[in-house]
Image (cartoon, grey):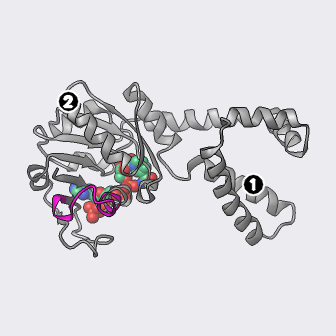
Amino acid sequence: MKLGIIGGTGWLGGAIARRLLSQRFVAPDDLHLSNRSGKRDGFETWPDVTITADNQTLVDACDCVVLAVRPEQLRETVIDASGVLVLSVMASTPMARISELTGAHRIIRTMPSPAVERGEGFTPWHANAAAMSGDRTTVQALFDACGIAEEVAGEGQIDWFTSLTGPVPGLFGYVAHALIEASVAHGLSREVAERAIRFHAMAAGNEILKSDLTPAQDIERVLGYGGVTTAGFEAANDAGGMEVFDVALKAALAVAIKDWT
Ligand SMILES: NC(=O)c1ccc[n+]([C@@H]2O[C@H](COP(=O)([O-])OP(=O)(O)OC[C@H]3O[C@@H](n4cnc5c(N)ncnc54)[C@H](OP(=O)(O)O)[C@@H]3O)[C@@H](O)[C@H]2O)c1
């Protein structure tokens, strides 16, 4: 498969491209990236990757094209993508708008995060009615090579994932920040608090990923234990801790569904 990424040297597009190259999902001479500046940064070790400023040349050379420019940049990315599979990683850009601006028929919206570069991305995807079964196989395989890919029930769920798993560390980073600041306020040195929480976040992530218990079951277990952490969870609940995240995600969703194109 010849793969093109418009905006392929950017933060997310570049992360996807480097992961697919390092996994040999795509051969360097089958990969075409575009940007306006002509920069090759991040791709010096793959001289056979084509980097062009001509988006239509990229589209014409490829079977599958990933849109990885910022939403407000899509308007300037004038292409006819009517003959290729278009995968969008863009926030705030509905399929209808992608079709209008690019002429694409077969469109799959996805929401990866830059964690794809380490193979740690959870990438939800949703295909439009024109996408064929081979297109679904392609998107699943491409993002499985970057972590885990999963089809979701509707395009609206992609917007929700924009704030849930699109950024990394996202809200988990916010929790880490809160824990560090509370510890510093309590008298710990900032260096120690940061080192402790960075390392503890790794352990917590592995535990959440690998435990037989769901996070809800783990909270129940701690609440029933009657110990130190129990008191912490109860106080967090009483202070509206659970609601804070619902409010945060809904606020982010309101921005995600705004039309930035
Ligand atoms: N970063 C994230 O964490 C993340 C997570 C989920 C989704 N996304 C989505 O991914 C998309 C890209 O975000 P990003 O953070 O990777 O932005 P970014 O780092 O600014 O990358 C965008 C790239 O597009 C290139 N570009 C701009 N206009 C272009 C044009 N007309 N033709 C070809 N290339 C063009 C830019 O390169 P030049 O300046 O050289 O042209 C730049 O490298 C956005 O739609 C965003 O919503 C990002």
**Image quadrant in which you'd find residue 31:** bottom left
Q: Are marks 2 and 1 in contact (CB under 8 Å)?
A: no
User: In the figure, is residue 201 to the left or right of 86?
Assistant: right
User: In the figure, is residue 13 to the left or right of 58?
Assistant: right
| Viewer-nearest residue: 245 or 258 | 245
Label 2 CB sits under 8 Å from any ligand 1 atom: no
- What crowding class fits label 1: few (fewer than 14 Cα within 10 Å), some (14-19), or many (20 or more)? some
Residue 64 lies in the magenta stretch: no
- What crowding class fits label 2: few (fewer than 14 Cα within 10 Å), some (14-19), or many (20 or more)? some
Going 17% across and 50% down the picture, which residue do you hit?
A: 1
Q: Is residue 244 above or below residue 6?
A: above
Q: Amino acid at mark 2?
A: Met
Residue 130, numbered label? none
How far across and how far down the image is residue 205, in percent?
62, 51
Which residue is denoted by mark 2 in the rendering? 132
Q: Amino acid at mark 1?
A: Leu
Label 1 CB sits under 8 Å from any ligand 1 atom: no
| Viewer-nearest residue: 150 or 251 | 150
How far across and how far down the image is residue 207, in percent?
66, 48
Q: Nearer the viewer, mark 2 or mark 1?
A: 2
Which residue is denoted by mark 1 in the rendering? 179
The residue tagged with tag 2: helix, strand or loop?
A: loop
How far across and how far down the image is residue 241, in percent?
74, 37
| Viewer-nearest residue: 6 or 145 | 145
Going 83% across and 60% down the picture, which residue do you hit?
A: 185
Q: Where are the magenta residues, as a range?
A: 18-31
Q: Quadrant of the C terminus?
A: top left
Going 71% across and 68% down the picture, which residue do you hit?
A: 195
